[in-house]
Image: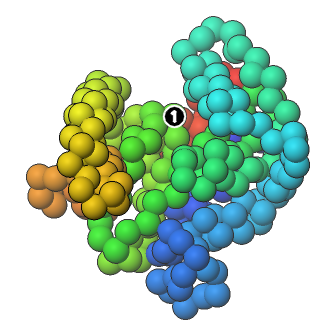
Amino acid sequence: MEHIQRLRLLFKDLLAMPYYKNCAAASGAVHNIASHEQAVEILLQQHSFTKWAPGTAKPNSETIWKWLNITYENMGKEAPVLNNNTMPDYSYLAQPCGTHDSPDFIIKTTGNIIIGIECKSADGYSPMYNSGGIKQNLIYLFCSNKSNATTMFCGKDVCSVDQQQLINELIEKQRILEGEYNGKLKQIDIHQRGISYYTRPMIQQSGGNKYTNYFTHPERGQCEENVYTYLETIVEKNI
């Protein structure tokens, strides 16, 4: 099927990318591309995905995630549920939920098929995830300065639903404790400076190189292959 073949070619090129910083700064290789996101955007355009400029009709974050979730959930259904998205075929939208929330891109091939891509970059061999967590239905592109290479994986292959639920529970408990202690700080604010404390949740990996190195991990190859299988299933179940 044409859609599957075009997606496979796109992600094959994304997987072959060198290191780029995840911000507007100098990259890790000798080229003039400022950031990881820009490098991905250039490849999207080279593969005939057009930048979507919806203007005032730009969908909000809730709508974006509704589209992504319907596409993902259709993988387990006999007949696809329509997500009624307004994106043109073979288009992409950068930072659809803003600059601080995932994903970095959504891309559409045709009809129901909306795919989320999140760009990760680090000096070392494992990425850091913020309070948004690791999304089951996103495809992550992670490049490392030390390896000057990229690997890719689906969120569902790195963090289980149960693990993410436990992390969410911990964050909620921290917020409650944070509110309690900020109330106490306010009561003793003798200098009237409004001193308060904010917990910034960050998700990382630990346990040594065996667990944390995304480039030597025994499941790296399978995770990369799972991305192609994931794309094929999404296309087959949403057309």
Where in the figure is residue 162, as x and y percent of width and height? 29, 24
In which quadrant of the rendered view does residue 132 lie?
top left
| Vertical side of 77 occupied by 157: above or below | below
Decide which of 120, 183 is in the foreground and name it: 183
Q: Does dot 1 land on a helix, a strand or a loop?
A: loop
Where in the figure is residue 143, as x and y percent of width and height? 44, 67
**Mark count:** 1
- Amino acid on which the number 1 mark rests in the picture: Asn
Residue at screen point 63% across, 70% down: 39
Where in the figure is residue 30, as x and y percent of width and height? 55, 91
Res 226 visible: no
Q: Quadrant of the N terminus?
A: top right
Q: Is residue 46 left or right of residue 143?
A: right
Q: Is residue 104 left or right of residue 60?
A: left
Residue at screen point 53% across, 85% down: 26
Q: Is residue 82 left or right of residue 154?
A: right
Where in the figure is residue 238, as x and y percent of width and height? 70, 24
Residue at numbered disc 1: 137
Q: Quadrant of the C terminus?
A: top right
Residue at screen point 51% across, 75% down: 20
| Vertical side of 127 occupied by 1: above or below | above
Decide which of 178, 105 is in the foreground and name it: 178
Residue at screen point 70% across, 15% down: 80
| Vertical side of 96 occupied by 50: above or below | below
Label 1 environment density (alpha carbons within 10 Å; few <14, some 14–19, many ≥20): some
Res 156 visible: yes
Decide which of 158, 9 is in the foreground and name it: 158
Rendering colour mode? rainbow
Q: Residue furthest top?
A: 78
| Vertical side of 222 occupied by 143: above or below | below
